[in-house]
Amino acid sequence: MNPGISSELFFASADGEYNARISSKLNASGYASLSLILEKSVSWTWLNPPRGSGVIDKENVPQPDCEWADSDNCDLEQQRRSKGNISCTIGVNTTDIGEFTLGAQCQISAHSRISGQIRLSIQKGVTVKLSLLRGTQTYSFPFILSDRPDRVALGYGLIFPILAFSAIRMLVYEPYLSRQLKLAQKSRRAKLREELARKRREALSTQELMRRAASRSKRNEMSISGLVIDQAIYGCLSPTSDPTTLSDVGGPLAFDVTIPLQAMIEKSHLRLPPGRWCDIQGFYDPCVGLLENPRQLHLSYTFHNSSHEVTVNENQGLAIPMSKHKVEIP
């Protein structure tokens, strides 16, 4: 036993992006230390959790309002864990004049983190420590590069771990996670096939009820050369494929919404605010279970006898007619 006392002051920004700690220690053997630790959350690509790791898969996915699909809420803690972390430590103690440490940490799965530190000490030289944190367990691997301060050792300690980590992540880990994510999405879509078919039938039934209003709106708009929806497709669209033929094990990935949009036109204008368009009457979400593609709306319409075309993400909103959507005929 080596009794002693320690204290720590902790400061954090309101959003949790910046942290600072001042810690001091004193034990019975006379060892004393004082350290300043600065930390920052960063969105650097090579430090962000890989897609498919179970950490960020739920980001940017619309939240279903039904019992048969998983809830995809993203709270502040989720946002914090979806970023990397860098730190800098400056310390003095009774066994060394001073120490300077740089570190970085990355969440690689829902329960695992990997971190690296390089320490420059006047008395102990250059040391690199790599750590794997799995749940409550920590596995550390220290490497002594030099027993005294050395610029060459410091350069190797900074560059080599970063290059090795980036290569393993890009060439091994991310391709593996991508394959696992595709298998998981395929399995989930297969389980949701019947429910998606039911939602599709309900949306088509709603469109039948709206058909008369849509036809009346179309006649009125055509009589004044106003806004007429020629075709509207909603879902996970591909620029290289016909949206009406896109499908997977869960069913079609796109849905025709021409009728409800035509019925919504007022005075030759149509506005859709950013949000979950699958909640609009006559719509449904054909892409539940997919994480990679945003929901989009491809629209072909006629205004003042001129053809217009536009594709937008649902989080961007839609306002038509607009002159920039006009199709130029060579």
Image (tube, grey):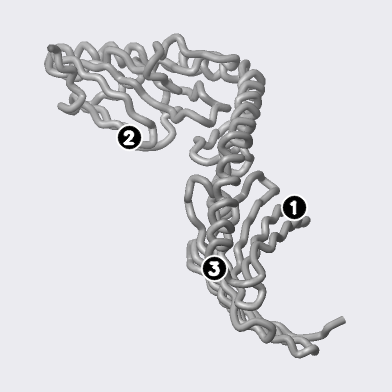
Does residue 246 appear left or right of residue 123 in this picture?
left
Residue 85 drawn above or below residue 60:
below
Where is residue 298? Give x, y as percent: 34, 21
Real-space Cα separation, disc 1 to disc 2, in angstroms: 42 Å
Mark in the foreground, 1 or 2: 1
Where is residue 214? Give x, y as percent: 30, 15
Element at label 3:
strand
Residue at image mark 1: 135
Amino acid type at circle 2 is Gly
Amino acid type at circle 3 is Cys
> Taking the image as drawn, is residue 9 in sight?
no
Element at label 1:
loop
Q: Which mark is residue 88?
A: 3
Q: Earlier in the sequence, mark 3 or mark 2?
A: 3
Residue at left offset 19%, top offset 24%: 268
Residue at left offset 61%, top offset 44%: 55
Q: Do the residues labelled 1 and 3 touch (CB within 8 Å)?
A: no
Amino acid type at circle 1 is Gly
Q: Which image quarter: residue 267?
A: top left
Residue 131 drawn above or below residue 315:
below
Residue at image mark 2: 317
Q: Which is more toward the observer, 235 or 158?
A: 158
Real-space Cα separation, disc 1 to disc 3, in angstroms: 24 Å
Q: Which of marks 1 and 3 is nearer the N terminus?
A: 3
Q: Which is more toward the observer, 174 or 187?
A: 174
